[in-house]
Amino acid sequence: MKTRFLLLFTISSLSAFSQTIVTGIVTDEKGEGIPGANVFIQDSYDGISSDADGKFSFSTDEKGSKFLVVTFVGYKQFQQAVELNGQPIKVNVSLREEINQLDAVVISAGSFTAGEEKRRTILKPIDIATTAGATADIAGALNTLPGTTKVGESGRLFVRGGDSNEARTFIDGMVVLDAYGPSAPNTPSRGRFLPFMFKGTSFSTGGYSAEYGQALSSALVLNSKDKAEMNQTDIGIMSVGADVAHTQVWDRASLSGKIQYTNVRPYFGMINQEVDWKTPPASLEGSAAYRKQIGKDGFVKFFGNFNQSDYSLFIHDILDPQVKYQYDLGNDYRYGNGSYLQSLNENWTMRGGLSYTYIQNKVKIDGIPLGDVEKGIHAKAVLENSVSDRIEIRFGGELIERDFEATRQNENSNQAELLSFREPITAAFTEGEIYASKRFVTKVGGRMEYNNLIDQLSVDPRLSVAYKPGKQGQFALAYGTFRQTSKNEYVMFNNNLNPEKADHYILNYQVINDKKTFRVETYYKKYYQLVKFENGNLQQLNNKGRGYAKGVEFFWRDNETIRNVDYWISYSYLDTERDYLYFPSSATPSFTSKHNFSAVYKHFVTSLKTQFGLTYSFASGRTYFNPNNSLEDFNTDKTPFYQDVSANIAYLPKSNLIIYLSCTNLLGRDNIFGYQYSVQPNANGEFVSRAIRQAAPRFLFVGVFITISKNKSVNQLPNL
Amino acid sequence: MKTKLTFILSLMLSSAIANDRYTDQMIKNIETVYKAQTNEEFQSAINLFERIGNAEKTKWEPFYYASFGYLMQAVRQQEGSKKDQFLDLAASSLDKAKAIKENESEIVALEGFIYMIRLTVDPATRGPQYSSMAMQSFGKAIGLNPENPRALTFMAQMQYGTAQFFKSPTTEACQTLAVAFEKYETYKSDNPLAPTWGKGAADDMKEQCK
């Protein structure tokens, strides 16, 4: 009996000291079992995957104090100290969701993000390049999105009842003072930056981050590409010029440069233009980008471009077209930008940058000089801290200094006079993003600015929340106060003008799945402190102007239903009025239209190795004032509606060759953007009008693009 | 005859190293991941690879095969975003392998394969970028080991796809494939845990090169 007992004891103690059985269950926060979780003793092979109910049971030879670890994709790692001494152990594991997952809610009100093609995004960088009618212009492509108004004679972005100067562009976080190239009066201008330079764009039509200041209506944030992967040379021969680019790649750095010469003179020689050109526009531009990896976690980017362009044209008097005066423009532009990104440790990231813009406009009207020069410096530093996967905070400081100098003809003395201002703005901003769960996120922030020119300190709040009740759909809300110094042409007359201000309120609902997007957004925007002419006098300016904009917008994109076809449709309804500048009362400004509609269609035909694109745009009539009517009817007349059908074809006969053809306004509609009236009435006492039309009914573009690299399968498709 | 010999050889091998727990467990689990069909089977094999990898710390093979397991799951998904999720996991496991052994031809080839599958999710957008990245990886993998049959097979596939798209001759691709076939027969790594998969992909392509 005794021996038997002893034997039993020995056996049990032996087994006790050789193996420990670990059992338990893995559940999520709601108590649901998680199957397939990896449950193991740290630094050993011993462990198992949890079963279909989340249960697990395994034995281990390990002894003493160890850690039991449980991991599962999308959840935070679980770790618990256990004592392995042969006694069975039961551990119930509750895993906490990790937030930075693809299906977590995101702040979406007001913004269209394109980039990181892995993410579900509404618009990809390549979409910008391949949208018909956009002719590879960033603003051109964004003008097919809701929230924008098509202002055909400008080509710029007009967002939600805002003027084009209210939409600011940022490259790698740094402000760009004038993102558009020069254009003749009433002809569309193109962006200075080519879409292929960027890996991502975020186009915000309101309620954007506290990091972006001095923008009243919209922030277009462009993120430039990282280090290039391959040496290559690109050559483009176009109907309006030529370009050559080269990229050189090193192990940890890359350098690319591009030179482009554009001359529309031969083209304008062939196709009749509405404009009476003396010398049509020609420009020389170049850009260079250098990227370098610094250490293990640092990255530095430099970008610079210059552009020199000029043209000369005749402006005819409306009353007597025989009377004309000559308008010359020379534009000299330089932009440089350096940015730096460094992760300091697991939680902290630092980024910063410096940008410099120089713009000189040499304008002459009948030989009388009317030039201006603007110089701007922007310096910024931002620190970001991931406190946990649920809380992220960001704060930073910046300096935006602008120097403006213009020559104007004094109306009284008829002498040239110099008008100028220097405006240094220092700002600090902070923002926190807090995830209560995967379904609910709040972003709170504020921006403090000190404007040295007017000696004014201001604080603007920002708030957004987003809630995702189901798997795909989500609601978002955004609010914010925004300010921006009024246009240079007013500040130069009155250095004491206050900044113009706007409050944004946005409500958004969107559903994004793999290949389809639906989105509806409604907003209210209140404008105040707008510049107003006292008694209609430009020399007497105040900040008594005010206004509002409200609207509803829809967006639908489908890349799935029809094979090889991708299309999107957007519609915007806009109701806006302002009482500002020379307006006699509150009225709808002429750069807005009530209804805007766009449909973009892209079809890749594999057998023809060709992509076809078609874009249809519609905008209801825009307001204008007919001075033959009484002032009570200010801006109550409307132009005919705007309509455009554009097409493009990209053909890839060989892997490194693209032939590109595009044409705007296929139907040749005579779009009228507005009317200009004579300054003086004619002999019958009537003011005579002249319609503002497209410079030419159509714009035809042909280009051949060749890529030379070791890898023959590389072509310029992503550039187009 | 040949299979018999391999069988005996592998028997001898496995008996010779029976006391090497690492090799033993790995060989068994590599077999499991090769045979896995369902997500559960893959996940359980991957979990073991990760346990071994976490315990060993100096071995690249466990994370290589964990990555391979995720990649095989990615291949089986229908929905693009699901594919991407598995590819993200495959890439992060492979990064761990890379951190242990930087210039391993097999790791670099698998990296190229990940790019290749990324490409298939959205060829129109990702084509130009990922095709060049994949080809670069395969080129590098072949450079590190000119006899790596997997790198050669995928290189052949990329070359074939490019040639087909542009309707140019597929001779180069088929030549590469022929070399790949030869290497599947002749190349034997001295690492008992070295990958042996991929011949099926070469077989599939054989038809096209007739």
Image (cartoon, rainbow, N blue to C red):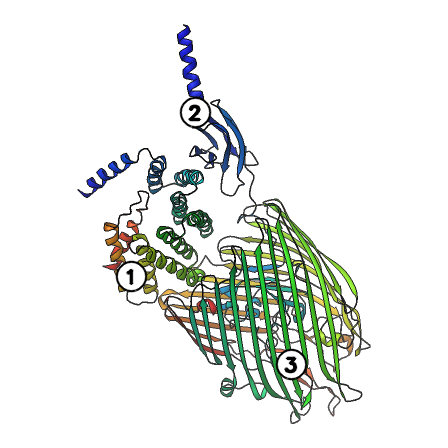
Q: Secondary structure at mark 1?
A: helix
Report the quarter where the N terminus of chain A lies.
Answer: top left
Residue A689: quarter of image: bottom right
Q: Which residue is mark 2?
A: A19
Residue flagged by tag 3: what amino acid is it? Asn
Label 1 is found on which chain of the structure? B
Comparing B55 with A668, the one in front is B55
* Labels 3 and 2: the sequence-earlier one: 2
Numbered disc in front, either 3 or 2: 2
Crowding at mark 2 (Cα within 10 Å: few <14, some 14-19, many 20+)? some
Residue flagged by tag 2: what amino acid is it? Gln
Q: Which mark is residue A361?
A: 3
Viewed as shown, does residue A444 lie left or right of A3?
right
Residue A280 % position (x, y): 56, 86
Residue flagged by tag 1: what amino acid is it? Ala
Q: Which residue is mark 1?
A: B173
Residue A522 seen in the figure:
yes
Residue A449: quarter of image: bottom right
Residue A696: quarter of image: bottom right
Numbered disc in front, either 2 or 1: 2
The vertical placement of A206 against B33, above or below, is below
Going 59% across and 47% down the picture, which residue do you hit? A468
Label 3 is found on which chain of the structure? A
